[in-house]
Amino acid sequence: MYQTLLYYKIEHIKYPESEMKKHLEVCKALQLKGRILLSKDGINGNIGGTLESVCLYRAYMDAHNTFKHIDFKQHDSEIMPFPRLSIKVRDEIVTTEAREDIDWKNRGQYVGRDTFHEWLKAGEEMVIIDMRNDYEWAIGHFKNAVKPPVKYFREIKNTMEYYEQFKDKKIVMYCTGGIRCEPATALFVKYGFDKKNVYHLEGGIVKYAEKYGNEGFFEGKCFTFDDRIAIAINTTDTAVVLGNCELCGVNTDDYRNCLNKHCNKLFIGCDECMEKMDDTCRQECQDIIKDAEHMRSPRAHTKVLHRNK
Ligand SMILES: [Zn+2]
Ligand SMILES: [Zn+2]
């Protein structure tokens, strides 16, 4: 059994390059794998390893001047969730393409999972906005949530006009672990939304699901950015399947990668269609892979899904 660790911290880092080097040493020594981004604005990590490694890493972080007090999201995973380790310094720890508009000191407010759950139960008047990408939304989201009209979160700045309709309403935004909502609430405030009305689900879907997975208001699965692809939120018989096969429309939430290596599209496909199409997304791709040279390697096919960014 392995562990996954999802975390972030918004905190000024004076020398991200040197933190990156120290992190590389620590993570290599602990044989951790996954992705960590550092910038002057903080750290964003999604890593995995054995229970012992993950515990040692957390101890390192808890004792660190800059990185202490992180609320880690740690979960079991049947598989080693990442194939390799990547630690990088970037301009942004979460891509918004709007960095110059983000004032980290002027963000919205957090709403904890308990209060949010109470609001949902009471039918509180609010607009719930899903801040994730299209392909994440497709297989699971909060009941009655709104999906902004963009494919990727990083296009958020182009959607500010769309949000105008919610300007006087109470807004609760959410994402997987909460990090995308940090710059998102700051952008809303920058664009004239009243800070008092802009909420951010603290800890995202992941924290909510830890407590309210089975009887909560999240429907379907939660997309993960590791080799598990998606995790069930509701593990009882009452779980609903959101998502439809792109080829025949049947209800399913299985993500696939087209076997044509030049296409490699990530799409939802049912077992029956995949058998008929030889694991490709359309006729052209099926024709191309008749020449095996155009097929992705079998390992990549079964284990690693390409996420179109
Ligand atoms: Zn199908
Ligand atoms: Zn294809």
Image (cartoon, rainbow, N blue to C red):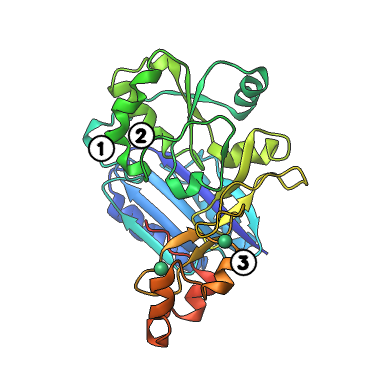
Secondary element under disc 1, as helix, strand or loop, is loop
Estimate how packed mark 1 is, as few (under 14), some (14 to 19) or many (20 or more) residues with alpha carbons within 10 Å: some
Dot 3 beta carbon under 8 Å from ligand 1: yes
**Residue 143 badge:** none
**Residue 98 badge:** 1
**Which of these two is toward me, 71 or 66?**
71
Residues marked 3 and 2 touching at CB (< 8 Å): no
Residue flagged by tag 2: what amino acid is it?
A: Pro
Residue 56: x and y in percent read 57, 57
**How far apart are the alpha carbons under marks 2 and 1?**
9 Å
In the rendered image, which quarter contains the N terminus?
bottom right
Mark sitting earlier along the chain (3/1): 1
Secondary element under disc 3, as helix, strand or loop, is helix
**How far apart are the alpha carbons under marks 3 and 2?**
39 Å
**Which of these two is toward me, 120 or 114?**
120
Closer to the eye: label 3 or 2: 3
Which quadrant of the figure shows ligand 2? bottom left
At x 42% / y 45%, what residue is drawn? Answer: 133
Quarter holding residue 156:
top left
Residue flagged by tag 3: what amino acid is it?
A: Asp
Q: Is residue 105 visible?
A: no
Residues marked 3 and 1 touching at CB (< 8 Å): no
Residue 182: x and y in percent read 40, 33
**Residue 183 badge:** 2
Secondary element under disc 2, as helix, strand or loop, is helix
Would you place residue 303 above or below residue 129 in this image? Answer: below
